[in-house]
Amino acid sequence: MTAVVAVSILLSLLLPLSLSCPKGCVCDGRTKVVDCRGRGLYDIPRHLQPDTLELHLQDNRIRGLGSMAFRDTPLLRVLDLSNNSITSVSPSTLLGLRGLQRLSLASNALRELDRRLLGPIRSLSHLDLSHNSLTGLPGAMGESLRNLSQLGLAHNRLQRLDKSLLENLEGLGHLSLKGNPWRCDCQVIGLKLWLETFLFRGGVVDEVSCSKPEEMKDKDLQNVPYQLFHSCMTTSYNYLFSNIHHLESDRSNRGHTHGNTHGNGNPHGPLGMGEGYGGGGSGLPECEPKQRPRPVNLRHAIATVIVTGVVCGIVLMMMLAAAVYGCAYAALMAKYQRELKKSEETSKGDHGSADEKEPLENAIA
């Protein structure tokens, strides 16, 4: 009996220690939310409860995220690390967080992200990477972003977006691309075509303000006419056709389904992580500028072919008419020359007979 009491007392002492809230943080046992905002933390706090669903670590002094930094909280759904001093993130930082739905790394000092960062995570619906120094996102990361509804990459150093990344953003609804030094040359035509498809589906985007070349500076890519991309259009037709095919497939799918919901919880509410959401990446298909202008779009190309065919037909008919007229004229002239020659020969024959008859009569006389 004494042993049982001792064990009970020991468990009663150890259990609170194992489930205690990290020092300086506020823990809600009912909602499973741990709030460690603005605590001057330099690292991820320890002794987190394993059933924690939300972890707020914004406004601290965290500089890096190591491997499996959140292994103690495998059920985490919301993770906010915005407004820290994070410069590096290990590719295996989020390993084990298969159910993560919302992630914010906004307002840090990130320059790049490893393509393995999101790993097997497929439930992510909100991702905010705005206000960093990212120059691009790896295209391979797109596999983990298929269910994303909001993406934030505003105010980075993005100049282009990776084509494979764009094609994986099938469920995206809100996108912010402002505050990036977009280079509006041939390589950005794929982004422009994708944005048109995205807007057609009902997506929301703020702006893509060009910074280079000089003649495009401060112009919104969405409002730049295709005439300015004449030299790029030929090499971009394949991308256009793939977008058209993808759009037609989307239309047919909508006829058989009632729509998709992405992630859990409220898909429309913002994560509360910075201002808006943006997209970025690097490297669209290379395209060489051409000297000769190309059709503005597919419709103009078809019209050009039709007009050319009509003009060529008219010219051919005119040439045929001229040939027929020439042949008829030549035949008439030949006939006229034959008749004229025959008439002259007949007239000459009659005149010769008269001359022969006159000497004969003189001789008889």
Image (cartoon, helix red, strand yellow):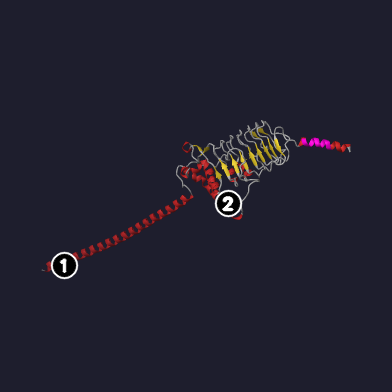
Look at the image and give the residue range highlighted in magenta.
8-16
User: Residue 357 — which label?
Assistant: 1
The single residue placed furthest to the bottom in the displayed view is 364
Q: Specify the quadrant that holds the N terminus.
A: top right
Q: State the residue position of label 2.
A: 250
> From the viewer's perspective, is 81 left or right of 318?
right
Point out residue 320 in the picture as x, y percentages from the top left corner: 37, 57
Tell me which secondary structure the magenta stretch mostly adopts: helix
Query: Image quadrant of residue 325?
Result: bottom left
Asked if residue 114 lies in the magenta stretch, the reply is no
Q: Secondary structure at mark 1?
A: helix
Q: Residue at x 30, y 61 (%)?
A: 332
Residue 163 visible in the current orientation: no
Viewer-side label of 1, 2: 2
> From the viewer's perspective, is 79 left or right of 176?
right
Point out residue 193 in the picture as x, y percentages from the top left corner: 53, 45
Q: Amino acid at mark 2?
A: Asp
Q: Residue at x 58, y 51 (%)?
A: 250
Q: Nearer the viewer, residue 79 or 246?
A: 79
Q: Earlier in the sequence, mark 1 or mark 2?
A: 2
Is 346 rendered above or below residue 188? below
Q: Specify the quadrant that holds the C terminus.
A: bottom left
The single residue placed furthest to the left in the displayed view is 365
Point out residue 71 in the picture as x, y percentages from the top left corner: 71, 38
Q: Amino acid at mark 1?
A: Lys
Kindly report the distance in space between the C-alpha atoms of the residues bearing marks 1 and 2: 107 Å
Q: Residue at x 44, y 53 (%)?
A: 306
